[in-house]
Image: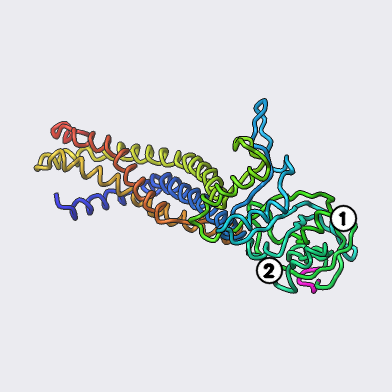
Amino acid sequence: MFITDLLEESYSAIFANKTRTALTVLGIVIGISSVIVMVSLGQGATSSIETNIESMGSNLITIMPGFQRTFSQVTSGRGSAQTLTIEDAQAILTEIPFVKNVAPELSRRYQIISKGKNTNTQVIGTVASYQDIKNVVIDEGSFISDQNVLNQAKVAVLGPTTRDDLFGEGANAIGETIRINGINFKVIGITKPKGGSSFGSQDDIVYVPITTAQKILAGVNYVSTISVQIQNSKLMNQAKLEITNLLLQRHNITDPQLADFNIVSQQDIIESASSIINTMTILLAAIASISLIVGGIGIMNMMMTTVTERTREIGLRRAIGAKKSDIGLQFLTESVMLTFLGGVIGIILGILISYGITFFTNTATKTSLFSIILAFSVSFLIGVIFGYWPAQKAAKLNPIEALRYE
């Protein structure tokens, strides 16, 4: 049997009853579109996290206080220790040659008041190099200077969201006064919008000199984190090792297992977040795939019904010389064509739904070529698997008994 004849016969048989065909492929359409949407949401979330993390700075290593020691199955984590200092940051900058820049930070939340309005937001005490390390772009005014840090100046740089909350949307806040923890600060700059992320909004924030944050606001000598910018991404692992050795030496710790700090890179954060999202995506896609099994059973049911309805036709074909393989191949082709049709519609619907989610909810989605190829492959396999039994049943019919069938 020629391939063109096979396709023509299959097309005619499938569309002989359009309503039944449409209802049969509906399960495949729902299953394929659901899988594509789930995968698109997962890949979009991963891409969004990578973009947000990279927007915080390039070639970045973050050092956080916290013991790794486990006692009675309890591990003290980030923020449970006050072990990092500005001197640690200075030592990293001066003693490790391939470190480009270092920025210690002291981060706390405070109530901020101005002109009768107030907001509770994150206040970061830091240094001038923070601007380059974390890709902070100034929209108006200027960022914190080394002189501000040296003089413990009461100056502040506002994120655009904080500015809007305190002074009104788009207001000129340069030179205005805000009160942080009851202390007056002069606004010297406004940053450009960066947007929110899984790690908090980078626009709802206030920057002050780190010495001011330590001595005047918090009354402490330690820092919350130290951000280290490495000259080359290829040196990240070496940098982590040398920073670890330096801090162990400075903190008089001989056993690395008892380190009172944690060091993570951007790649560590991305890999950890991506691993969680990928696991959830696979789980959701697996749940969505249940409808594919239901759709496959529906196709098998339709094909079994079709074999029964066309028993006399099968007998006639066998009587005039058709082989068992010809009969089986025809019904198998019809099954694959049904799932292929459902797959195409499902892919189109899945892409449209993904774009719709992004358009109406601003949730990031990313439809990849891989998910489309996977959908086509799954459609083909479903057609073969669930069409094989009906095709074999049709091929094994006795021609004489088939011709006698009423």
Residue 334 image point, x, y percent? 27, 46
Front-lying residue, 365 or 356? 365
Residue for badge 2: 192
Label 1 environment density (alpha carbons within 10 Å; few <14, some 14–19, many ≥20): some
Residue 348 placement (x, y as % from top left)? 43, 57
Q: Kindly state the secondary structure of the residue where label 2 is placed.
A: loop
Q: Residue at x 90, y 57 (%)?
A: 182
Q: Amino acid type of disc 1? A: Asn
Residue 338 position, x and y percent, is 33, 48
Q: Quadrant of residue 361?
A: bottom right
* Left or right for 82, reference 293: right
Q: Which of the marked residues, 1 or 2, is nearer the chain's N terminus?
A: 1
Q: Nearer the viewer, mark 1 or mark 2?
A: 1
Q: Give, as a three-letter code, the residue at label 2.
A: Lys
- Relative to 133, residue 328 above or below: above
Magenta range: 168-173
Q: Is residue 286 above or below residue 183?
A: above
- At 76% across and 66% down in the image, what residue appears? 157
The residue carrying mark 1 is 181
Viewer-proximal residue among 284 and 26 = 284
Left-right relation of 22 to 310: right
Front residue of 341 and 11: 341
Say whether residue 157 is magenta. Answer: no
Please tell me the numbered disc located at residue 253.
none
Majority secondary structure of magenta residues: loop
Count all numbered tags in the image, as a single digit. Answer: 2
Cα separation between marks 1 and 2: 25 Å
